[in-house]
Image (cartoon, grey):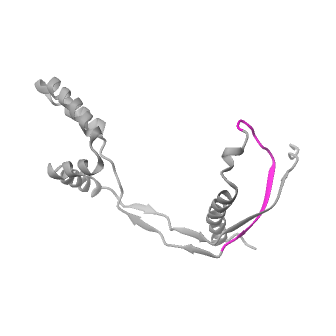
Amino acid sequence: MELTPEVLLAIESGVKDGLKKLVTENGDPRVHVTPDQTVKNLVVNMTLELATLSIGHDTDKTPTCSIPLLPTLALLIKRMGATREAALVMLREVMEEALTLDKDAASKLLEELGVAEAEQAIKEQVIGKLPRTFVKKTVKASGATLTVTGVATVPAKDAE
């Protein structure tokens, strides 16, 4: 049989899906393996069966970005001038207080003060200038069965 793109995608997606099932059935192999070893010339024969291979299409999406918090704070501190020392003391206090806020309280505070809206406006201005991000087609294997039919260590091939 020819290794068509569909067959290669079936192998890629099916082995991942089948391996998850093997780990579920047999436990995580990392727990029981002896560390600091190298296994050479290992041959694993297996059969992969798939009930379905779904192949989507290429898409694009709005790129994402994060506003760099620490450089932003550094620039703010740099521009504070005469109020810098008092502002640094206050900044330390509010950082400690922010660490105590749960997610709901933090979201409510950002909404009340208009920070969430300002952040969204800045993101839209920055992201609006970026090109859309390419997303490769989705590939999903379902009903994968990976059966190991043999395991062997073969001698290394002689160097020519």
Q: Is residue 3 left or right of residue 13?
A: right
Residue drawn 85% across and 53% down? 152
39 magenta-colored: yes
Q: Is residue 66 magenta?
A: no
Answer left or right for 25 relative to 117. right
Please state, as top left, top right, bottom left or bottom right, where the N terminus lies in the image.
bottom right
Q: Position of residue 102 (x, y in %)?
A: 29, 46
Q: Residue at x 19, y 26 (%)?
A: 89
- x and y, in percent, of residue 122 in the image: 22, 51
Instruction: Give the magenta part as a residue range.
Output: 35-50
| Residue 38 relative to residue 111: left or right | right
Residue at the image position 67 percent from the left and 46 percent from the top: 30
Foreground of the two, 4 or 71:
71
Above-or-below relation of 149 to 105:
below
For the C terminus, the quadrant is top right
Residue 128 lies in what quarter of the image?
A: bottom left
In the image, residue 121 sits, relative to residue 32, either above or below, namely below
